[in-house]
Image (tube, rainbow, N blue to C red):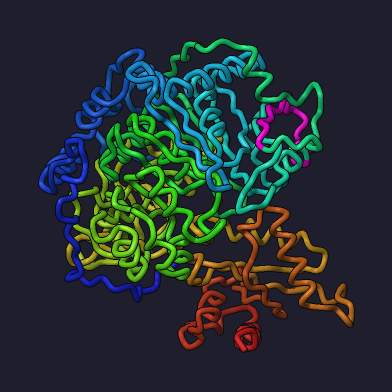
Amino acid sequence: MVEQTQKSHISLDHEKMHAPPEGFFERSTSKPNLADFATYQKMYDQSIQDPATFFGEQAKQTLDWIRPFDQPRFPADKKDDFKNGDLPAWFVGGQINAAYNCVDRWAAKDPNKVAIIYEGDEPDSGRKITYGELLKDVCKLAQALTKLGVKKGDSVAVYLPMIPEAVVTLLAIVRIGAMHSVVFAGFSSTSLKDRILDADSRIVITADESKRGGKTIETKKIVDDALKDCPDVRNVIVFKRTGNSHVPFSPGRDLWWHDELAKYGNYFPPTPVDSEDPMFLLYTSGSTGKPKGVQHNTAGYLLGALLTTKYTFDVHEDDVLFTAGDIGWITGHTYCVYGPLLNGATSVVFEGTPAYPNFSRYWEIVDKYKVNQFYVAPTALRLLKRAGHKYVEPYDLSSLRVLGSVGEPIAAEVWHWYSENVGRNKAHVVDTYWQTESGSHLLCPLAGVTPTKPGSASLPFFGIEPKILDPTTGEELKGNDVEGVLAIKSAWPSITRGIFGDYNRYIDTYLRPYADHYFSGDGAARDLDGFYWILGRVDDVVNVSGHRLSTAEVEAALIEHDLVGESAVVGYADDLTGQAIAAYVSLKKHKLPADADLEAIKKELILTVRKEIGPFAAPKTVLFVDDLPKTRSGKIMRRILRKVLAGEEDSLGDISTLSNPQAVSQIIDVVKTSRK
């Protein structure tokens, strides 16, 4: 069981219900994917009562199969889901190919239909790629990878910026039945190395350099630094993003993207893969510190990505979806690459940031390409709200029908700003809750159908059976107006099938904390109307700008500094990033010079974390303390550290049982001093 959650201060006012915008469906030229709320309720009930039939029918209707499946779900009965670490198998006996479903079938229908709109870091530096063009490039790279010895089931590491070649890369890898392991291109060489080694990747695909926010990033150099400790990597395919002739290049190992693709023809047949064959790995932070290689399998993931894109955003073939999320995270995988392309829509791939060259960049893109669905993290929205309405007002945003939010709960005032200033009160705001491990949405409104409440993730998607459990006893808290931890009762098609190379860790993390349930790691409440509210992590994971970071991982980086004896990392509320990282650090007094410059040491510690993990993981606050509060068994009491940082010194509880209760008063003094 997990530490008892605090009673939340969030308003669960059941009166604040917002109906979908009037005339929502009339603003689309296509027939609604979901007629009304009653239809959602009927479909949802069927998906819970008979998931085998429900998802079997959906899979037959929406995906193209190389060999039809024999059983939609085995076992069909969901009563034993999660028992003893068991998961059902989906679409048993079926064979499919992800790239075919994303590209070939749409290229055959209309090769001139635009699949990807690329907007570069600099305005007006992009281009459009049709489904026909995408198919050719995917097939060429698939042949190049095959020639380099990549086989079905192998993993290929991907370290690329947000450029069309990133989409081509993912689709080429799955076309030959291999797994992609995408590493966010903001991670350090150390983090990249760890992920290459854990996934046992022998091929890396990267770029010479990257452009972001007007800055040039030495992408290939980071890869080279990582590969110093990766002797099994055979080849590195390098895309020329900037063409800088001074970028390091190792003949024999390194290969230029354009040279490799020029060797091959325009078509290469897709490899049939079994429904439950692995499709990709994506590393996410865990409470133990070591990143987890979350494994998603093919057919279930594809169906989850397709259906949630279709219904959550009401996406049709003639729509343009702009997901402002990097492919290094699950949001980019599911809703920038696979979801839009599985539905035959057009996806915007944006290389830059919302603030470059000014705060109007997103709205300029929406206006220029007549975007219909926009999906972004609250961190960016807070930044843009703070910048002011003057950056939004000049642009024609009338094409927008759906405004999505992802990564963390969206505050009510930001929700209203988003709806009123960006959506002009005509677009439906859908605040979505899901995880890397879920593959696709768990809780979310459905566009044009579900009533919404600012700050609430609303209701479950098809097949998702959420439960609120008592965090101490594990008993289900039935009815409404309850608060506890969020768990899911039965499996859904896109659920992760495990942690790569460590299935026991998968069981310990997700299935063992609460018997017969999948444990989300989040606290949640169900209000008087049955709407769900996410209250934040209940484990040692912090959420910075929608990125989950392990406190243990950051602590391990801090300990790398020669002067650090101990460290404890906690998250705290931040107006811009949602949560920020605070590091409590106890220095080695015997190594500390008498004239030590503590401010300089703070900067060194922040740089250490940036180097070991990446810039986004750097602590915003570093506090030097004499000692950290510990239980008599030696466990650091991060709960106390969080409360002190939040100014809740009066509700620390009984600290007399600590092995060092005197440490708490000194910590309180340090925090108070830091605020002056």
Q: Say which residue appears at 47% left-offset and 20% top-offset.
A: 135
Q: Quadrant of the rendered structure where residue 566 is?
A: bottom right
Q: Is residue 232 rendered magenta in the image?
A: yes
Q: Position of residue 614 (x, y in %)?
A: 66, 54
Q: Is residue 596 above or below residue 403?
A: below
Q: Quadrant of the rendered structure where residue 618 is?
A: bottom right
Q: Number of labelled discs?
A: 0
Residue lying farthest left? 38
- Give the camera-side residue of 235 and 272: 235
Screen quadrant of the N terminus? bottom left
Q: Is residue 193 left or right of residue 275?
A: right
Q: Say which residue appears at 52% left-offset and 17% top-offset.
A: 139
Q: Is residue 505 visible?
A: no
Q: Say which residue appears at 53% left-offset and 34% top-offset.
A: 164
Q: Is residue 639 visible?
A: yes
Q: Is residue 574 above or below residue 462?
A: below
Q: Position of residue 613 (x, y in %)?
A: 67, 53
Q: Is residue 469 above or below residue 348?
A: below
Q: Which residues are magenta?
A: 225-241
- Give the camera-side residue of 117 and 17: 117
Screen quadrant of the C terminus? bottom right
Residue lying farthest front? 394
Q: Say which residue appears at 87% left-offset and 75% top-offset.
A: 590
Q: Position of residue 51 (x, y in %)?
A: 23, 34
- Give the camera-side residue of 93 and 165: 165
Q: Is residue 325 left or right of residue 299?
A: right
Q: Is residue 291 rendered magenta in the image?
A: no
Q: Position of residue 412 (x, y in %)?
A: 32, 69
Q: Is residue 56 above or below residue 470?
A: above
Q: Is residue 501 left or right of residue 437?
A: right
